[in-house]
Image (cartoon, rainbow, N blue to C red):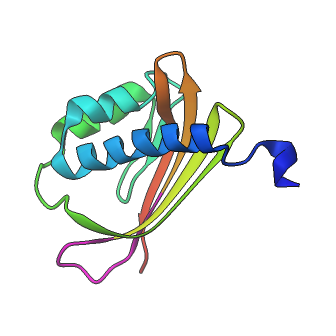
Amino acid sequence: MDTDLDINRPDVLADLTAAFARYETALVGNDVAVLDELFWHSPHTLRYGATENLYGFDAIQAFRAGRPATGLARAILRTQITTYGERFASTHVEFQRVGSERIGRQTQTWLKLPEGWRVVSAHVSLMA
């Protein structure tokens, strides 16, 4: 049963949802400082993007620093957030970039660390 796994406990879900909303705002606003803050500063962090595979926080940070700040606006079509216990969560988003017909997908794995919720793994892709 879900209750045995402590799925979506209201206080944990609210906390993670706030962190996720902060991430989304930073993403479309190209607030690189907040994006960097919300990714785990570890060589174990990874991000698979539409055109790049990034291994470790340093590679992710360098990608963000060099990414153009235009064309980031997107409409969120669907979001699903699930927390598992107090320290682990996943977020899934279907999105569409403004001016594009293509549907994108974003999956993130979040871990609650002493400094707060952090993305430890991310995957972004566009459907054909």
Can residue 121 be seen here? The reply is: no
Viewer-closest of 51 and 26:
26
Residue 115 shows in this picture? yes
| Marker count (numbered) | 0
Q: Position of residue 30 (x, y in %)?
A: 18, 44
Check the image and report above or below for 85 versus 67.
Answer: above
Q: Position of residue 80 (x, y in %)?
A: 54, 61
Is 68 placed left or right of 60 in the picture? Answer: left
- The quadrant in which the N terminus is found is bottom right
Q: Quadrant of residue 61?
A: top left
Residue 55 or residue 88, whichever sits in front: 88
Q: Is residue 103 magenta?
A: yes
Q: Is residue 83 above or below residue 78?
A: above
Q: Residue at x 61, y 44 (%)?
A: 10
Name the residue rendered at 23%, 29% in the picture: 33
Q: Tell me the quarter of the image containing the C terminus.
A: bottom left
Query: Is 2 or 32 nearer to us in this picture?
Result: 2
In the rendered image, the vertical position of residue 118 relative to residue 100, given as above or below = above
Residue 58 higher or lower than 4, as above or below:
above
Residue 38 lies left or right of residue 61; in this view the side is right
Magenta-colored span: 96-106
Q: Which residue is the extreme one toward the top? A: 114
x 28%, y 84%: residue: 101
Q: Could you say where residue 121 lies in the image, as x and y percent from the top left?
A: 52, 41
Q: Is residue 95 left or right of residue 113?
A: left
Residue occupying the point 54% across, 38% down: 110
Q: Is residue 44 magenta?
A: no
